[in-house]
Image (cartoon, grey):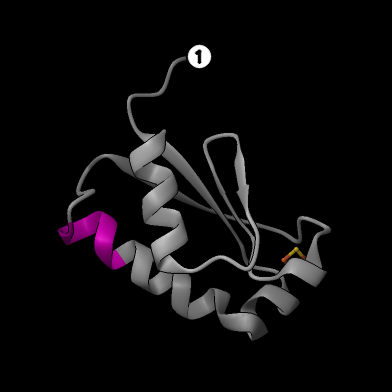
Amino acid sequence: MQHKRKLVFVCSGSDCKKSGGKALRKELKENFKHGEFKGQCKLISTKCLDMCKTAPVVIVGDHFCKHATIQKIITQLKKS
Ligand code: FES
């Protein structure tokens, strides 16, 4: 199935939350609602992705962003 919107999976497991995943998710949500990616991305929360040592973990398309920051995710979104 082809998606028009890019899928962004944010881990909402406890280690990722502790490492800033919660704030990151909030920031992404805001950006996808009002920022430059408005209407282009779909944010999905996942359970633990079993990569807790590299928390917070975000998947953009088929790319894993380890130690994810908003900048890393935006760069990846622009590439994909
Ligand atoms: S809590 Fe996010 S990968 Fe485990």
> Mark 1 packing: few (<14 Cα in 10 Å), some, or many (20+)?
few
Frontmost residue, 43 versus 62 = 62
Residue 69 rendering spot, x and y as whole percentages: 49, 69
Residue 33 rendering spot, x and y as whole percentages: 22, 57
In which of the image's four quarters is ligand 1 placed?
A: bottom right
Tell me which residue sits at (64%, 82%) in the image.
Answer: 19
Frontmost residue, 10 versus 79 = 79
Rendering quarter of residue 66? bottom right
On whether residue 31 falls in the magenta region, the answer is: yes
Residue 73 rendering spot, x and y as whole percentages: 44, 56
Is residue 47 shown above or below 80? below
On whether residue 72 falls in the magenta region, the answer is: no
Q: Which residues are magenta?
A: 30-35
Ligand 1 lies under 8 Å from the Cβ of mark 1: no
Q: Which residue is mark 1?
A: 1
The extreme top residue here reads 1
Q: Amino acid at mark 1?
A: Met
Q: Quadrant of the C terminus?
A: top left
- Main secondary structure found in the magenta portion: helix
Tell me which residue sits at (27%, 39%) in the image.
Answer: 40
Q: Is residue 19 left or right of residue 2?
A: right
Secondary structure at numbered mark 1: loop
Q: Is residue 9 left or right of residue 39?
A: right
